[in-house]
């Protein structure tokens, strides 16, 4: 999954540099940002970026297809591993007399 996403983004970056007009529904700035996130190994940030830019998932182009697969393949794992502060108890309301030694 990650290898095909990396290959697709790399090919599209090269195509952008060569001025290929076949770059469907996405803009160069999105492509470059995605490339930076992938090369940095920032997979959670990539999910956030795609969620903030849902238009990247639209269309039948290679990038939309790869990003859709990435989002589907990583949704369960990241949800399972995500740290959610709202699950922690509010310890601000606990006084010292409640402490167990």
Image: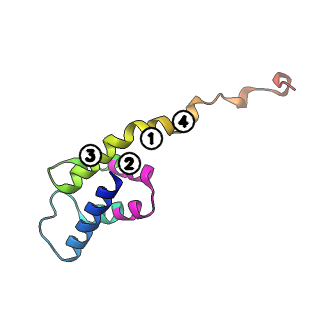
Q: Which residue sits furthest left?
A: 21
Nearest to N terminus: mark 1 or mark 2: 2
Asked whether the residues under the numbered discs 1 and 2 touch, taking CB atoms below 8 Å apart as contact, a structural biologist would say yes
The numbered mark, 2 or 3, whose residue comes first in the sequence reads 2
Q: Are marks 1 and 4 in contact (CB under 8 Å)?
A: no
Kindly identify which residue carries mark 4: 84
Label 4 or label 3, whichever lies nearer to me, is: 3
User: Mark 3 — residue?
Assistant: 68
Q: What residue range appears in magenta? A: 35-50
Residue 36 at x, y = what percent? Answer: 39, 65
The answer to which of 10 and 34 lies nearer the viewer is: 10
Q: Which residue is mark 1?
A: 78
Q: Main secondary structure of the magenta part?
A: helix
Depth check: 87 or 92 in front? 87
According to the image, label 2 marks what residue? Answer: 47
Q: Secondary structure at mark 2?
A: helix
Q: Residues within 10 Å of mark 4 (few under 14, many from 20)?
A: few
Asked whether, in this view, residue 31 is left or right of residue 38, the answer is left
Q: Residue at x 24, y 73 (%)?
A: 14
Q: Are marks 4 and 3 in contact (CB under 8 Å)?
A: no
Residue 32, percent from left and from top: 32, 66
Label 1 and label 4: CA atoms lie apart by 12 Å
N-term mark: 4 or 3: 3
């Amino acid at each position: 999954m990650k290898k095909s996403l990396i290959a697709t983004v790399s090919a599209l970056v090269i195509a952008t540099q060569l001025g290929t007009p076949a770059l469907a529904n996405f803009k160069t700035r999105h492509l470059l940002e995605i490339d930076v996130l992938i090369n940095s190994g920032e997979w959670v940030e990539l999910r956030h970026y795609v969620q903030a830019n849902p238009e990247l998932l639209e269309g039948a182009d290679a990038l939309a297809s790869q990003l859709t697969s990435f989002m589907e393949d990583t949704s369960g794992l990241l949800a399972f591993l995500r740290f959610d502060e709202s699950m922690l108890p509010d310890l601000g309301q606990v006084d010292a007399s409640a402490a167990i030694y």
